[in-house]
Image (spheres, rainbow, N blue to C red):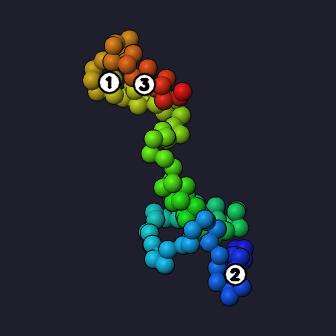
Amino acid sequence: MRDQPKDELGRFISPYSEPLSKKIVGVRLPKSIYERLLELASQQSKSPGEILRELAVTVLTQSDSQPQNISEDTLKQIRDTVLSKLKLGKQSQGAKAINQFIKELRE
């Protein structure tokens, strides 16, 4: 793990534009995810907490108006699942509407 920068009084400096909250949030993870977190932290020479903080800040600061970065293949799989539940074919008006929606998400 790397040393975090400190101010002249020896306090940790926030890597963000605002100070960190004094409240600490804990989370229990599935074992496989925890192991992957440790591996990622080791690869990046960061603590698991730093990795989780970066992930949380990234996700929670994204604008709600921006679509998530979902691949077109995933969107098409979702489309096919929805159409099968509605018992509609890929050439139906519903499919065309979903395809147009996917196209607009990409623009």
- Circle 2: is it few (<14), some (14-19), or many (20+) Cα within 10 Å? few
* N-term mark: 2 or 1: 2
Task: Give x and y (percent) for residue 45.
Answer: 71, 67
Amino acid under disc 1: Ser
Mark 3 or 2 closer to N-term?
2
- Give left or right: position of 85 versus 79: left
Q: Which residue is mark 3?
A: 101
Tags 2 and 1 touching, CB below 8 Å: no
Q: Is residue 20 left or right of residue 65?
A: right
Residue 25 appears anywhere in the view: yes
- Which residue occupies 36% across, 29% down? 81
Instruction: Give the alpha-carbon distance from disc 1 to disc 3, as whole Å.
Output: 17 Å
Q: Label 1, on which residue?
A: 84
**Left or right: 4, with 73 as reference point:** right
Which residue in the protein does label 2 denote?
Answer: 7
Residue 35 pos. (x, y %): 56, 64
Q: Residues within 10 Å of mark 1 (few under 14, many from 20)?
A: few
Please, is residue 76 above or below residue 53 in the view? Answer: above
Under circle 3, the secondary element is helix
Q: Are marks 3 and 2 in contact (CB under 8 Å)?
A: no
Image spot of residue 69 (x, y percent): 53, 40
